[in-house]
Structure formats: C-alpha cells, structure tokens
Amino acid sequence: MPETHNRVTRNPVPTDTSGGFQICPGPYLENGAMVVPGGVSFTVHSQNATSCTLHLFRRDTYEPYASLPFPESYRIGNVYSMVLFGLDIREFEYAYSLEGPHDPENGLVFDSSKYLLDPYGKAVAGQSKWGFKPKFANQYRSRVVVQDFDWGTQKQLETDLQDLVIYELHVRGYTVHPSSGVDYPGSFEGLAQKIPYLKELGVNAVELMPVFEFDELKDLRIVEGKRLLDYWGYNAVSFFSPNTAYAAGFELNREGDELKSLIKKLHENGIEVILDVVFNHTAEGNEDGPYISFKGFDNNVYYMLTPDGQYYNFSGCGNTLNCNHPIVQRMILDCLRYWVTAYRVDGFRFDLASILGRNEDGSPMSKPPLLQNLAFDPILAKVKLIAEAWDAGGLYQVGSFPSWSRWSEWNGRYRDDLRRFLKGDPGLATVVAERMAGSLDLYDPTHRGKNASVNFLTCHDGFTLYDLYAYNEKHNQDNGWDNTDGDNANHSWNCGAEGDTRDPEILALRKKMMKNACAVLLCSRGTPMLLAGDEFCNTQYGNNNPYCQDNEISWLDWSLLETNRDMFQFFQGMIRFRKEHPVLKMETAPAHCGLPSVSRHGVSPWYLDSWEETRVLGMLFAGRNGDDTDDDLVYVGINTYWEPQTVRLPDLPKSHSWTLVADTSLPAGKEFTSSRSGTVPPLRKIHLEARSVAVLVGTPV
C-alpha cells in the first residue's frame, strides 16, 4: 500500500471500478478533495465509523447521481481515500454519509441518512446569494476548488504588531449601505474599492469579522416586520471555506479568488489582514441542532460532551468544540496553515479563545497543547495570534492567557478601565496610568513579550464610540429578546440626553468625549484597535448586540463622513501622530535628557495622587526617535473632571521646550496646532479645559 500511495500522489492510475467510475486508492495524507492528474481525490477520516460513502450531485439536483462506498481496502487506519477518474469539477458537488453506532449517551450519533459536508472542504455549494435560501435548504454540499491564484512575487508584510493600527470591520456592513458609493456593495470587491479610504485614514491592518462560510438564514426570525439573520457570522459551517455570499460574482470552483484578490490589493497598499476566527463552536448547535458535518463524522471526538452525552456549552451557542483532542487540534492547525498559505493571511483573532485552552472535560489547562502548537508552528511563525481571553462559561484570562511569548490579547481591562475613567468615574487615575503604559501589571515582558496588549475601547461587540457617549443604557428591543441580550456593563454616559438630541452643547460634548477617547487610545503603549465607523460617528442607535441586524442599525452610513469630517480628521491626525512617535508604541533607546521611558504626573509633575477623586493624569513618554539622535518626548494631559484644571508640566532640559500639538477642547477642525517649534518663553503650565485631553511634544529650542 505505501507504494500505491506514493504512486497516487505523483501520477495515479486506475486499479478498480465502482459505480461506473475508474478508481484507485488516494493520497491518504491529504485531507479533503483536490484535483489530481486524471481525476479528483477524496480523503476523510472517522475514528468510530464502520463505513463511508461518497455521494456526487449534479448542481441544482437534490438526489445524488452516484453513491460510491469506499472499498474496505481503501481504508488505512481510520482514513478513507479514493481517486475517481474522469470527473469534471464543474459538473458535480459532493457530500459523505457514514455508517456507525448510534449510542447518544456515549456521544455516538451516526446516521447514514444524513449527507455531510467534508470537514476539509474548500467551498460550500448553494450559499452564494446573501439572504436567499438555497434551492436545497439544509442540505450542505462541498465543491472542489482550483488552487492556482497568482500571488506574483508578493510576500507577507510581517509588520511588527507594535506598529499596527488595527481596524475592525464587517465585510458586508462596511459597504452595503447605498451611501458607500461602491460598485459591488457588501462584498469583498466592495471593500477593495475602499482601500484608498483606509490609506487616507492611516490604518495598516484590517481585522475582518468572520469570513468562513456561515448560513445567515440559520436562525431566521421576523420581529416587528423585520427579518433578523445571523448577520455577524459567528456560527461557522465550514472552517476551510470562504463565505461565498461576500463575493461579487459567482466563483464556480474558484471560490475564494475574490477574497485572495482583496488580500493581495491590501498588501500592495501596506495593509495587513487579520481574520476573526471561531473555533470555539460550530453551527451544528446542541442536541436539537442539525447534522452538518462533525456530528456525523465523530460527534464524541469533535465536541465536548457531558458523561451522559449532552453538549457542554462554554460558548453560549449550544456546543463547544473539543479543541484539545488530538484530531481536533490537527484540524485547527491544518485550517490556519491553509489560510496562511492559500490566502496569505497575516494574523488571526480567536473568538472566545479561553475555550481553546479547556481540556476535554471542560477544565482549564495550564499548558494547552493546541495553544502551544499554534505558538510554535513554523508556518504560523510570523502571523499574529490574538486571543479574546475569555469565554461564555465564566473563564476570564486577560493577563493570564497561556502565551509562550507569542499570543497577544484583546485587553478587556484596558477597555473597561479607560471607559470608566474617561467618563469621570473616581479612583482610576493610577490604574489608567498602568493601562496607558502598556499594562505591564498584566503583561510582564519577561514572560509575555513586548506585544501582548491589544488596546481597544470599542469593537463589534458593544456600543460604537458615538453610542458610548449617547446612551446610558442598551436599547436592544429590535433584537426580539425584550432587551435581555447584550452586556449591561457598558460604562457609558449619554452626556445629558438619551439618544438623539438637537442640543448643541450635548452634541459638542459628545464629540469632545469621542476625541478624548481617540487621543488616549492612540497615545497608549500596546497595539490600538479601532472599530470601523467610529471615525465618523457611526451609530447603532443604542443597540450593543446587533448580531442579527442586517439593516441600517449595523450598516455604516457613509454620509456621516461628510457630516462629521472633523472627527475623521482628528482620527487621521492622531494615527499619523502615533506613527511619528515611536515612544508611544514601545520603550526605545533612553532619552539623552535622562527622562525615564514612562512617568506619571498629576496637577503637579512627578506626583500622581492615588486619592479617589483624582481625575487629572499626565503621561510622559520619553526616548529616542529610532536611530535619530533627537529625543522623542510626548506628554498626554487628561482631565476627566467637569471643571477646568491648571497643570504644571514636567521641566525639560534647556535644549527643549513643550509645544502643544493637539487639544480636544479647541473648535472642531482646529484641534491640531500648526506650530511645531518650541514656545518662547518656555511653556511651564497648561490649562486643561473640563473633560479634555491635550497632547504636547518636547521640541528643540
């Protein structure tokens, strides 16, 4: 048999016939279906199945035109592999069925009447039109994909994490609104047409919410006359397949080419691509959910099960993937390698990543083998690994996620502490100083490396930045759950009126609060992440969980860009300022003037009062500007008090003087000062208006 395997991988030849097809043993080490000389190979595995049958379907037909059991001699161990000759990949779709024991209490639920997706399938048939049920709903089938995309000489960018400004977006929601002005709204191509905008803003990484194939109609509901869908897509149907509904055209047997083209164009413009991946659960749900793939292949291998065969639900979505079972580990590792090699992806953000560190019985592991294998895998060596370091089962690991100095984290503590401080809550000045300094109290560089903290104030999950300062409470009634869904701990403040208002003072205060948040985020050590649309006051009308809202609640309204041009310009200016000052990103070579790398100040320099009512914080970052001999000195003054405060600045050597660069209390569009030379006489104090942030630099006199 080894000789046969070696022959098949080079130039397979028929050895048998079945159902009118010439066949031979396939490449056992190559999971999935792929084109080989003269035919197509099909390889799957199951630990507990007793037999496996391959089903071939014509497009747009319900019943298979051929059902081919794998000969017993074509099985090695638990792997079934077969080459079929003479197949035209344009003319068929395929699925599997497996025979095996049905013993639900022991987690075995084989059902040979179910057609199953290939766990390694590279495309799912029938899903390509958003919001429309395929002709054969609930019957998932795979399609063979040609893998010959021309990447030319392009290599991955490998930008240091500390140099990234990440921009999280939803592929459909980013351009589907009529105001987007793109030719193919809601698609990968539509997003590609926004690349000039991304460059103008200054971000250099996009984090795409799920682009693995999912069924947006899975939980279709009608609430108050509106269709509610699985809009976000955190219910993967197939881990190796792109979401074909995001393609502008019909990519028969070339599924994924449009996404690859998008990634190639982003790379050409210096923008990395991070995928939001969901390996904590699947769309198969619990005992009442459908058979799609894993239940029918090996339910008790792929899912965490209780002793009586029920599904553990640490994901909050019905089931939990058994990530540290060796078979599942390998599948996840193979999947990520595929997205890096076939799609040239630059990084991954792992949804509810604490699940990836749970043992098969659900208990947390100190050294989870999956996380360790991902950290040391040679193919993944240069990509970003970013964990959402908590799960729906109560495990919260911000600051303690197993890392091997490779894993970064969404810093949920940064979000919560900064939100509370910026709206004026007491007792947080010293804590926020730690967050802005890189959260070294959470991420010791000795054990976590220098890039562990991904700082953010908003993301898809929760309020937008505008809503953070427009609503005291969530308003999720449109979701149909009586406003019981979504987080209640938003740490938001409506600035004096709940939701819409015409009060000019409240509207001006909201914008100032947003600019405060932007300035502080982009002047904090750690990698900043922005939510798409925050830069022009996008709103979700107080909905902090619009996972099901495929409408104006979730879509970006691009007309707001002109309405709030001053906000865009402020974001743009702060991103540019961050890029110009390496001391905001990391500890550089020591400053010539002797100032420490980071220092904390209050209304008086060199002393930050730990008093509960302290609401003034000054952060001074000092070092050198790369190889330049000049010192790089940045002071960020924050006043979250509702009254103005006069702050004395730290003294600089006679060779330098403080210069005001930005002040959020200045009129809209004039927050940045034009002068970059030192002030004469030297600036000793600064007047911080109520609820404002000022940014200064030390400039040569």
Image (tube, helix red, strand yellow):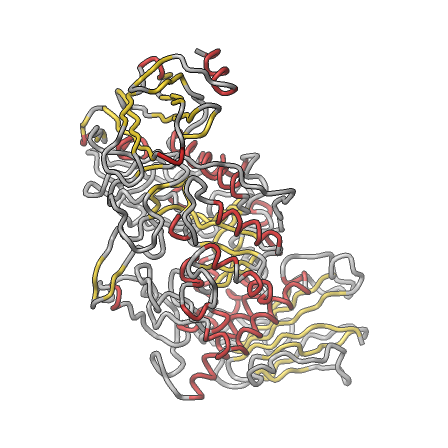
The quadrant holding residue 19 is top left
Horizontal arrangement in the rendering, residue 553 relative to residue 466 (left or right): left
Foreground of the two, 510 or 433: 510
Instruction: Say which quadrant the N terminus sits in.
Output: top left
Q: Residue visible at 37% across and 65% down? A: 554
Q: Residue visible at 34% across and 73% down? A: 541
Where is residue 89? Give x, y as percent.
40, 33
The quadrant holding residue 252 is top left
Q: Is residue 437 above or below residue 372?
A: below
Foreground of the two, 206 or 628: 206
Foreground of the two, 134 or 65: 65
Horizontal arrangement in the rendering, residue 32 relative to residue 373 (left or right): left
Q: Is residue 357 visible?
A: no
Question: How many labels were placed on the picture?
Answer: 0
Q: Is residue 148 above or below residue 638?
A: above
Foreground of the two, 117 or 272: 117
Q: Is residue 313 above or below residue 646?
A: above
